[in-house]
Amino acid sequence: MELKVLDINGKETGELVSLAEEVFAIEPNDHAIYLDVKQYLANQRQGTHKAKERGEITGSTRKLKRQEGHGDGPAGSIKSPVFKGGGRIFGPRPRDYFFKLNKKIKVLARKSVLSYKARQAEIVVLDSLTFDQPRTKAFVGVLKNLALDTKKILFITPDVDQNVYLSCRNLPKAQVIPSQQINTYQVLNAEHLVLTKEALSKIETMLKS
């Protein structure tokens, strides 16, 4: 598949780039995508949830009433889970939600979502994307030139570019990541991918190996 290369003004440069078939034209594996997205979202969880059990509740430990003769079951402590304000039974405890995922599965998932984007014509290739200084207005201008200002966009740069990142940071529908940090969730969550020629080359090299 070949795509036309555009400049930041949205004009064709007359150049074409070929998308590697082994990265952008494979048969997508939906289960691999599911697993990679599941791991990504699990890793975002802090896991700091905590509820107090009966041994952690502050309260009197005196026996509330006599053992027998009152028609109710015995009650030994106000901290019992059956009383209001008592401890919680099997409440959540701090935990790490990380789980291991095979590297080949992660690569397959990324190839799969990129193949979906290519199949749906949701990839835009720029010759370059640089700013002399951070300017959100200039970044919005690029989006308008590409007719993508109302879409949810993921920009992929060759390396970390602080000026581009800061220019995009305040835009709720746009994100910028370097090519090394490409992940299945963000690609799937974006309506369009915008990447430079150099970023495209790096992604293909990374996912082919």
Image: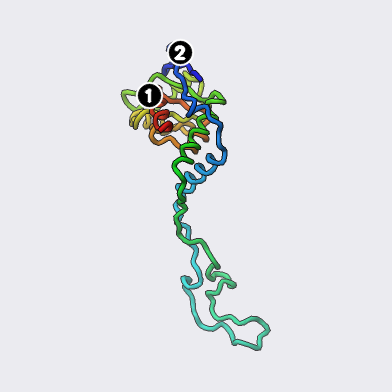
Q: Is residue 162 left or right of residue 50?
A: left
Identify the mark at residue 12; answer none if there is no mark.
Answer: 2
Where residue 100 appears, as percent x and y from the top left, is 45, 49
Neighbour tally class for label 2: few under 14, some 14-19, many 20 plus, Cα within 10 Å: some
Between tags 2 and 1, which lies in front?
Answer: 1
Q: Disc 2 versus disc 1: distance between alpha carbons? A: 17 Å
Q: Is residue 13 above or below residue 133?
A: above
Residue in the image at 42% along x and 25% along y: 200
Nearest to N terminus: mark 2 or mark 1? 2
Q: Are marks 2 and 1 in contact (CB under 8 Å)?
A: no
Q: Is residue 180 above or below residue 122?
A: below
In depth, the one of 153 and 60 nearer the eye is 153
Mark 2 residue element: strand
- Colouring: rainbow
Residue at numbered disc 1: 198
Query: Does residue 71 show up?
Result: yes
In depth, the one of 102 and 13 nearer the eye is 102
Name the quadrant containing residue 63. bottom right
Amino acid under label 2? Answer: Glu
Where residue 180 appears, as percent x and y from the top left, is 38, 34
Where residue 37 appears, as percent x and y from the top left, is 51, 42
